[in-house]
Image (cartoon, rainbow, N blue to C red):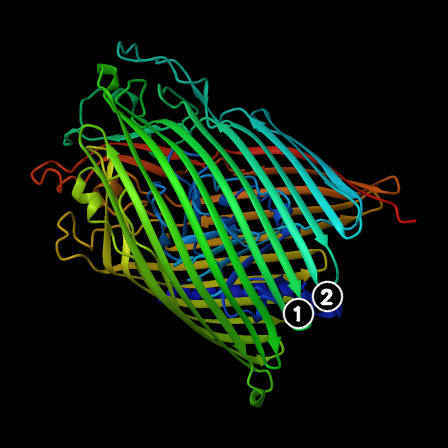
Amino acid sequence: MLHQVTRILLSSAAMLATFAMPAVAQDMLTLEEVVVTAQKRKQSVQDVPIAISTLDKAAIERQRITNVTDISLHAPNVEIVDSPANTTAATIAIRGASQISPAITWENSVGIYLDGVFMGKNLGAIFDIAELERVEVLRGPQGTLYGKNTVGGAVNLITRKPSNKFGGSLTAELGHKGYWSGRTTINTPDWQGLKSSLTLYQAKRDGFTDNRPDQLGNPLAASPSSDEFHNLDEQATRLALQWDLNDNLSVNYTFDHSDQDNKPRFGQLTQTSSNSYLYSGMQEPYLTKDDERADKGSNDWAIEETSKSTGHALDLQWRGDSYTLRSITSYRELDWDDTIDIDGTAIDIFHSSRHVDYSSLSQELQLSGSLDQLDYVVGAYYFEEDADVLNPITFFGTFGSPTSNNRYGLDTDSVALYGQLDWRPAMFGDRLTVTTGLRWTEERKDQYIVHPGMFNAQANDTFENTSPSVALNWVFTDDINGYVRYAKGWKSGGFNGEAAVPAEFNEGYNDEQVTSYETGLKSMLLDGRLLLNGALFYNEFDNFQLSVFEGKFASSVIFNVPEYETKGVEVEAVALVHESLQLTVAYGYLDAEYKKFPSDFTYFDKGDAGTPYSPENSLTLGMDWRIAQTGFGLWDLRIDYSYRDDYVPFIDPDQNAASKMGDRALLNARLAISEIKLGDSGTLQIALWGQNLTDEDYRINTIPFGGVDQRIDPNGDSGVGWTTSYFGDPRTYGIEVRYNFQAIDD
């Protein structure tokens, strides 16, 4: 396998270098510098000793990045998909570190930050991310520069700041399946240092799948729960205020609100088993293929998925001669509800709901600056969150079985101190940068669980950790940097909100730690026309947290894997072939393996266990082509091809046997005419876009109902009773028209 990976990397580099050679004669032709703030100050991405994928404003527009899941198509070893059945909840994995349970009591392996504010949970994370200035995907553990400590990495969403002139844009889209959207952005002119930006957004689309009455004449069938599955109905508002009181002090306030009212994805029944204790035979007529997305079906409990989120953030910055003192205060609320059909039929065999009430408050103080050969960042962070979940579950409701109104929740308080120093020893003439960081965290968790008629329980614990990081960056030439990095990451333990018996809750699970080793090379070759970056990484996880879904009571078993490791390769390249043509390649190779299982674990052997959301190979190819530059406007074509190897979403081999995600290849394109002059103050842009142009059918998740039950019934059958599958979006296409305007200078 190593030889195969080496050949792929060498051939990719050779291909891009060959394509870039014709540009040698164009003396002034170079790639634009990419500036990031991953280390809390502005730096070229080539100078940061971390594996980072970036998307600037132009790339976000050309590649039509409209939600968080789109980001994973453009970063190696990053997998982001909707959680099972949902359209507004995310499952995120970087380098084999993932959080697979949808329960809100879990800590995220990957942190999402919106303008420096940590988004506490991935429910509601599939939000419209219009008005983004930049996206930064940091791979590997983060903690010495960020509010929360994460083991997998961080996704930074940086929004556009208000401008100092009156202007804005009006955007309208029409597309497949009755899709339409409208977006209005207005910037007010500078008034005594105060600037503002207001964005209003609305989008609607019919469902991708019809929900029709039962066609089999089944006397137990109920009426369809809706006319369609996976529609879109969303409104969003964002207000940004920036007030520069003087040369030193600025106040930034943002308000965002998103309201989504969608129908769940269609749950296709793709497997049943007569060997399972759950087998009844009633589902057999509803079976569909596991590699073919259905365009119609019949569910009786796919009722709702609503997400209402509101956020306030206050960012105060005091800039001295050589330092900046910053305070970031944030408060967020989330009301999230779903009711989903999990049996894949028109019979009420099993359905469930989640009604989530969540809020979080964070306060971060940060001091950064420079002293001669030293750059520093030190900070203090406080985070608290509260969540209450009502989780009704109904088995065989068609026969009058009662609903179990389960509840669980948490109250978390987290305090952290962190710091990082970048030192450039004078003796090396700025060639060597030594980066050291340290983070201390203490988290207290109070959790409860209520299973009516079975048991109630409460538990609490405090988790503490200190995580260091060290990196060396060496400048070989003005265009080539190499680095090595050692870092530790951590996420706290907790208690299982989906436990079926008291012991499963009271025992809890331990905190997880990762030790990461990474070495990389960042280069700008061929006189600035070829960017070629690569990284090798090796991660050792201790007490890796995993969840095993149990079907008998729709519960989960959570346990710690003593030793788990991931290793791999990542390559990213951009070649400026001609002033009108740019090519991109992003490739990732990932090898994940359990090294040691708990001694009392009897469910299955570690050699058979799956490593969730860890495709071995991921590849993205992109092309930007300026077709023509005319007096009427600029004609541009963007094409993206992305490939993912097959992977499994669970650890249980029985469940994975019916849940394996096949490999997939997606093709997206966008043709735009921009800079069309309309008067003295406006320009028009018209774009045609298409996604999944080959109409590929591919599963993104499953719910395998059944599986491990030995702790509850050691002699019971652990076979999977049925599997309900959820598929990615079909081919979509549309047209976008945007009018940009600004005030005319006197």
Q: In the rendered view, tell whether residue 187 sits above or below residue 224.
A: below
Q: Quadrant of residue 83?
A: top left
- The reply to whether residue 420 is visible in this rendering is yes
Q: In the rendered view, tell whether residue 202 sits above or below residue 575.
A: above
Crowdedness near tag 1: few (<14), some (14–19) or many (≥20) residues, C-alpha within 10 Å: some
* Amino acid beneath label 1: Gly
* Residue bearing mark 2: 29
* Amino acid beneath label 2: Leu
| Residue at x 42%, y 46% (from the top left corner) | 385
Left or right of residue 603: residue 34: right
Q: Quadrant of residue 697?
A: top left
* Residue nearest the viewer, comparing 197 with 665: 197
For residue 528, the mark is: 1
CA–CA distance in space, label 1 to label 2: 8 Å
Q: Judging from the image, what secondary structure is the residue with disc 2 in?
A: loop
| Residue at x 78%, y 43% (from the top left corner) | 167
Mark positioned earlier in the residue sequence (1 or 2): 2
* Residue nearest the viewer, comparing 562 with 149: 149
Left or right of residue 229: residue 580: right
Left or right of residue 677: residue 733: left
Location of residue 545 in the rendering, given as x and y in whole percent from the top left corner? 28, 53
